[in-house]
Image (tube, rainbow, N blue to C red):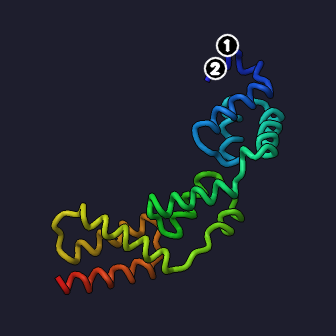
């Protein structure tokens, strides 16, 4: 983004605020993400600190609220497991303490999501032997961040359904 023909040397705090508002208009960002984007654009450290603190003060940056929203997205849309959700939040630049506070769930919720995901995956899987299908599901659930125990429970249910068919 070229800010009205200004070179990198003449970027001001007002330009930093304007750029930050533009970034936030596209999607919510964590404090770390916003700080990195401003620094990458070439704003001075003082301008970055001033802009981030000003936006946090006004409520435009709220990492806790963002973490809650991202967690819901990771669970409901992406159907990620517990570790997958943590990794997703960490990748978006949220602090570990916020992630720990926000990621409190029961094993039942994770099993329900995993079952939904397996049902969805089975609809798109081709014809594989039962053993090959279990291996594929195992790897798929592992990549989505599900725990060993959850995967074992889901695959036991898969085996029972397979025997009934």
Quadrant assignment for the C terminus:
bottom left
Which residue is pictured at 28% across the width and 75% down the height?
A: 134
Residue 46 position in % (x across, y down): 83, 34
How many numbered circles are shown?
2
Residue 101 to residue 73: above or below = below
Residue 122 position in % (x across, y down): 26, 67
The crowd level at tag 1 (other Cα within 10 Å; few <14, some 14-19, many 20+) is few
| Left or right position of 41 against 140 | right
Residue 94 to residue 132: above or below = above
Quadrant assignment for the N terminus:
top right
Residue 146 position in % (x across, y down): 46, 71
| Tag 2 residue | 2
Of the pair 66 and 45, the residue shown nearer to us: 66
Residue 85 to residue 132: above or below = above
Q: Secondary structure at mark 1?
A: loop
Report which quarter residue 97 is drawn in.
bottom right
CA distance for labels 1 and 2 = 6 Å
Q: Secondary structure at mark 2?
A: loop
Residue 113 to residue 153: above or below = above
Report which quarter residue 2 is drawn in.
top right
Residue contact between numbered discs 1 and 2, judged by CB atoms under 8 Å: yes
Which residue is pictured at 23% across the width and 63% down the height?
A: 125
**Farthest top residue?**
5
| Tag 1 residue | 5
């Amino acid at each position: 983004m070229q800010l009205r023909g200004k070179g990198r040397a003449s970027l001001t705090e007002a330009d930093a605020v304007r750029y930050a508002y533009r970034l936030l208009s596209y999607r919510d960002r964590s404090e770390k993400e916003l700080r990195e984007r401003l620094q990458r654009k070439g704003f001075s450290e003082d301008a970055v600190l001033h802009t981030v603190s000003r936006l946090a003060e006004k409520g435009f940056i709220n990492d806790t609220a963002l973490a809650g929203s991202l967690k819901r997205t990771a669970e409901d849309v992406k159907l990620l497991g517990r570790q997958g959700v943590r990794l997703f939040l960490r990748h978006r630049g949220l602090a570990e303490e916020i992630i720990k506070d926000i990621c409190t769930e029961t094993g039942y919720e994770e099993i329900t999501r995993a079952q939904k995901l397996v049902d969805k995956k089975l609809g798109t899987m081709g014809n594989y032997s039962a053993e090959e299908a279990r291996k594929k599901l195992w790897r798929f659930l592992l990549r989505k961040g599900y725990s060993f125990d959850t995967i074992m429970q889901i695959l036991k249910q898969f085996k029972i359904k397979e025997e009934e068919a």
